[in-house]
């Protein structure tokens, strides 16, 4: 999702907020009275993990000082248990505070200002509109602010060493919010999380979005895996069922227009939770938490690795793809290069998925072996022309992906963008452009990319 993956996936540099995690209730559930949850169930959950369950009453305003102290005491007990489950020595150099929706919006606004220039945000909006993710002309900054203000439940800020809980979070969701954000607190005790999160965003015009997605999968998946392992008690990672993880993934990939105005964007944001959690847990089961901890020193390269633990262990490498700038200038005379980037398996999967297309989307995106696209401006009045290539493990994989492209979600008619593709062996070229220009732009697509396949494992 371009370079904004680091913030919109839920935990950006310097403590950007976590969006609603997998398995959490909808916004309506957050607003409803929490008496529907079972007091006995809350107590049992606490007893199973050796902690005292809070008498968590619903709240729509900032809790008073005593309430904050009660929740902080409970959170400290929970964090010690979470850290013990990970074999990490805990410390008490952190605190709990509350944040309302206006505070969340202000926090995200500061993070956007720190991370991105106005030009980068502008191009992000243009590129995603050409891909059909958001409407053309929508202010991407305001869109993200609205999205996070309405959906964030909590965040951990490593700069302030503070866990912020939404003042509107009811008792039914409090354990989940605390558990996930305290998972980030445990990370902060293993690595300098503020410094590490600053490395998630690699920078524009380097084709790095998929690598950023992979790092986001790690940091969000590790936090949630730590929480789920704690919930499982003594079995740890082995106690988290595959069915639960599969349901988490299916819930996210089934997001559609019934729950959000921007379903592709929502799936792109939320998939790192499910993909990262499942992969981290599987790695922890097979090789122990030390193998998970080691990932912070030897970071994953692609979202493909974070979707498939075998490819993470083997460090299967994507093809090396470059752009021939001279050929690009000749082939697309009159258009201006404004961005070069990657999508990655996770983003393609999130794009194709939906309640009725999970299996097809999964089959069409497995076998990914790299991609790259260029964004070519045709003026501020219209979305850019996107020209790209995807590379696949086999010709069959390439054929399946191209077939799925024929079912690509249609952008709004006002966007004036249509999709065309062609295949050359294991490479599929695609163009998003004005319908009148499709034939000519597609004809030149295979002239501008240079593809070099790489070995299974990169050198450290």
Image: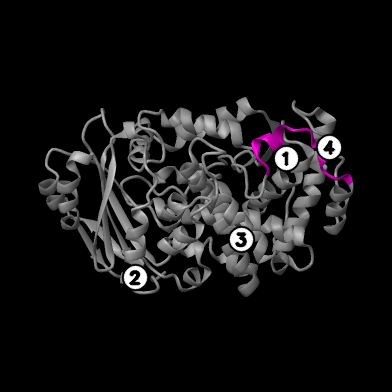
**Mark 3 against mark 1, which lies toward the viewer?**
3
Q: Earlier in the sequence, mark 4 or mark 3?
A: 4
Q: Earlier in the sequence, mark 2 or mark 4?
A: 4
Q: Nearer the viewer, residue 52 or 95?
A: 52
**Mark 1 against mark 4, which lies toward the viewer?**
4
* Residue at the disc numbered 3: 246
In the picture provided, is 347 more to the left or to the right than 454?
right
Q: Secondary structure at mark 2?
A: helix
Quote the CA–CA distance across marks 3 and 1.
Answer: 34 Å
In the picture provided, is 173 more to the left or to the right than 217?
right
* Residue at the disc numbered 2: 396
Quote the CA–CA distance across marks 4 and 3.
Answer: 29 Å
Q: Nearer the viewer, residue 323 or 402?
A: 402
* Residue at the disc numbered 1: 95
Question: Residue 35, which numbered label?
Answer: 4
* Residue 417, quarter of the rendered image: top left
Query: Which residue is rendered at x = 76% and y = 68% of the image?
Result: 235
């Amino acid at each position: 999702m371009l370079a904004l993956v680091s913030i919109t996936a839920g935990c950006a540099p310097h403590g950007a907020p976590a969006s609603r995690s997998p398995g959490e209730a909808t916004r309506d559930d957050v607003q409803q009275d929490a008496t529907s949850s079972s007091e006995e169930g809350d107590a049992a959950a606490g007893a199973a993990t050796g902690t005292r369950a809070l008498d968590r009453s619903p709240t729509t305003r900032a809790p008073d000082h005593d309430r904050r102290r009660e929740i902080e005491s409970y959170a400290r007990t929970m964090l010690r248990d979470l850290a013990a489950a990970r074999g990490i020595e805990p410390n008490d150099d952190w605190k709990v505070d509350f944040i309302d929706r206006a505070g969340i919006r202000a926090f995200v606004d500061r993070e956007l200002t720190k991370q991105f220039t106005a030009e980068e945000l502008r191009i992000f909006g243009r590129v995603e509109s050409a891909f059909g993710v958001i409407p053309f002309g929508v202010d991407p900054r305001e869109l993200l602010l609205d999205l996070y203000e309405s959906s964030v439940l909590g965040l951990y800020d490593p700069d302030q060493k503070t866990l912020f809980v939404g003042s509107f979070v009811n008792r039914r969701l409090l354990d989940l919010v605390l558990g996930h954000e305290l998972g980030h607190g445990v990370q902060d005790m293993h690595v300098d999380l503020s410094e590490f999160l600053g490395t998630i965003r690699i920078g524009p015009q380097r084709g790095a979005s998929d690598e950023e997605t992979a790092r986001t999968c790690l940091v969000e998946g590790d936090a949630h895996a730590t929480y789920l392992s704690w919930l499982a008690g003594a079995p740890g990672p082995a106690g988290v069922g595959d069915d639960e993880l599969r349901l988490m993934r299916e819930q996210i990939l089934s997001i559609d227009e019934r729950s959000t105005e921007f379903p592709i964007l929502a799936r792109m944001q939320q998939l790192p939770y499910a993909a990262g959690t499942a992969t981290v847990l599987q790695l922890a089961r097979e090789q122990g938490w030390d193998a998970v901890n080691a990932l912070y020193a030897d970071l994953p390269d692609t979202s493909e690795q974070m979707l498939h633990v075998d490819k993470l262990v083997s460090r299967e490498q994507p093809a090396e793809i470059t752009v021939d700038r001279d050929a690009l200038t000749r082939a697309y005379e009159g258009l201006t290069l404004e961005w070069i980037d990657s999508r990655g398996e996770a983003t393609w999967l999130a794009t194709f998925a939906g309640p009725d297309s999970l299996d097809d989307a999964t089959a069409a995106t497995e076998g990914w072996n790299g991609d790259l696209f260029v964004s070519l401006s045709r003026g501020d009045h219209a979305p850019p022309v996107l020209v790209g290539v995807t590379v696949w493990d086999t010709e069959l994989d390439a054929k399946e992906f191209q077939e799925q492209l024929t079912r690509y979600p249609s952008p709004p008619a006002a966007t004036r963008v249509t999709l065309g593709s062609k295949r050359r062996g294991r490479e599929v070229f695609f163009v998003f452009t004005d319908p009148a220009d499709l034939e000519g732009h597609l004809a030149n697509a295979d002239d501008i990319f240079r593809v070099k396949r790489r070995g299974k494992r990169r050198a450290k």
